[in-house]
Amino acid sequence: MQRAVRRPYACLTLLGFLGALLLSCNSGRVGILFDINGNPLAGTAVVLLSIDDEGDQLSQLDSNITDSNGNFKFKVETAANGSVIVSAQLPNGAQRGFFAGRNDFVPLHPLTEALVALIIDITETSGGRSVLDFSADELRGIAEKVFALNSDSIDLSNQEAVKNFLRTNVGRDIAIAAGGSITALSTEDFEGSTTSSTATFDENTTVCPIGIKIFVLSSTNFRFDIEEDGTICGGTSSSLSNIFAEGAFQLAFPNDTFHIFGASIFPASGTGTAVLEDSREVALGPHMLAEPLVDPPEADDIAITRKVYVPTSGDTIRHLEIFTNSGSSERTISSVEVRSFLETGNESLLLTFDSAASATTPSTSDRFVVAYDAFEDRPTVGLIFQDGLGTLTIDQLDVPGSAGGDADEITFGWTNLSLPANSTTTILHYALLSTSRVATELDQAMQAILTNPDMSGMSRSELAALANFTPRRGTVNGEAGAVIGEASVTAVNQRSSESITLTANSDGSFFIPLDTESSDTIQITASDSLDLVVTVP
């Protein structure tokens, strides 16, 4: 049942405010606990806690039980900045509020839980803002504004809906209190210098089948044997059996073919070019698609480049799929797939996936899946195909145990990929190899990659063209708390009129890869009502 609080302050006048006033005759602060529907809740334990920047408990300062009107009181005298919260454990989970509360009392309510969650989203970024940055006066001011809002239309049991309600109505207030700064730099300073050389592929029959040439890039514990088409051969470790069948991460276009090559999969670079960039990234192509329904075949306006990057540590591999439409008309590719097969056959299993806590199988809204072999000593593999903040999401996902695909297949893809005229679109995906088979460890590892995806070496234009991720490097940058988390942010270069709009990270940081020069003025606006001009030094 959907039910929302109706101006909570007014409700308190009859329900519990008189009791709160009586309690307040003594020293300390009083408050009222509300249930998920916004009604006062009696007979429930409430604790006063100090917390760290990730919202984790440091110490318990006091405790109390609510009376018949939901009132509680804490007698201790303590700071009331963002490091001190009140919490109650309800059937649907913890409900929190800042000890700063409102001017007259401390509400513990679905609205205050959403406020705490939004601020912890900002502060939990390492090296970013802190709960100590939020003063008692700032928190009380925000709380007073929150409880003056008409929230009748909000389902208080839907925490994400409540958070979105606060993002819209008090997001700018939260960001101002956080104090995240915004800076800019020129494209020249951003790009820096790069090195490149020819990538030479050689046969290694101890690793891959006869006739397959590879270029090897090693990380901490695993190596990645990159083939001439950007796939990887099965060998990743000298001590463990292969997890991948040969040709993992194949880029396929089921309804299109490549010009000259004729096949529907991205071709090997033996007849094209392969460049090693900054000693860690192999660039393959570009290769042209064939123009459809033309005889004899002709090259289309769509060129595709693959880039494969392996950092020196972390045991990850990153693929960039770069689509360039040089024509004057928007084009659509009906189907794009990234296909991988495992050496586990019918014994392929998922260890975990993004929504594993609430679902039995992954869906196209998930960001990652992790597969392993429960019966043989092979690496565990995690695949990340979107961050949930980009404009493009997968609409195909075949994994072990799902209805589509083979038992040993992991394929993700996009249908009707739109390529605007005279533009480039970049799709990014990652894979992680690990020796762990502990679901919680792999979930944490995947979440860590998503929190700070490695975009090292990506050019400004590649970042600007990202479709399925939000950029993590840019020329116009806001630190955590610059805007409310997940705000839509637009930067406009007032000299060139170029603009880029993207979604900020959950901590309110953003990185906009706008083309800039020294002395350019950049207009920055956001859905949380930010309106600011910065000058490029």
Image: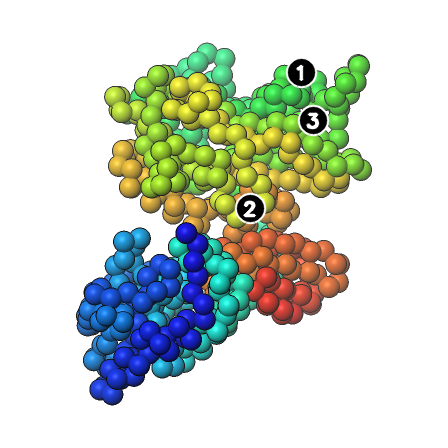
Determine contact: label 2, label 3, CB under 8 Å.
Answer: no
Instruction: Please tell me which residue lies in front, 70 or 480.
Output: 70
- Whole-number angstrom distance, CA of label 2 to CA of label 3: 26 Å
Point 45% across, 39% down: residue: 366
Residue drawn at (67%, 29%) of the image: 333
Identify which residue, 510 or 349, lies in the foreground.
Answer: 349
Mark 2 → mark 1, Cα distance in angstroms: 32 Å
Secondary structure of residue under mark 2: loop
User: Which residue bears the numbered disc 2?
Assistant: 390
Residue occupying the far front of the picture: 14
- Could you tell which of marks 3 and 1 lies nearer the N-terminus? 1
Q: Looking at the picture, how far across and down is residue 71, in whole percent?
A: 26, 73
Please, what secondary structure does the residue beneath circle 3 have? strand
Between circles 2 and 1, the one closer to the viewer is 2
How many circles with numbers are drawn on the protein? 3
| Residue 61 image position (x, y, % from top left) | 20, 72
The disc label shown at residue 262, or none: 1
Camera-side residue: 335 or 298? 335
Task: Tell me which amino acid carries mark 2.
Answer: Gly
Would residue 131 be visible to someone looking at this image? yes
Q: Amino acid at mark 1?
A: Gly
Question: Of marks 2 and 1, which one's residue comes earlier in the chain?
Answer: 1
| Label 1: element kind | loop
What residue did someone put label 3 on?
288
In the rendered image, which quarter is residue 43 located in? bottom left
Asked if residue 280 shows in the view, the reply is no
* Crowd class of label 3 (few under 14; some 14 to 19; many from 20; radius 10 Å): many
Q: Please tell me whether residue 368 is drawn above or below residue 524 in the rendered image.
A: above
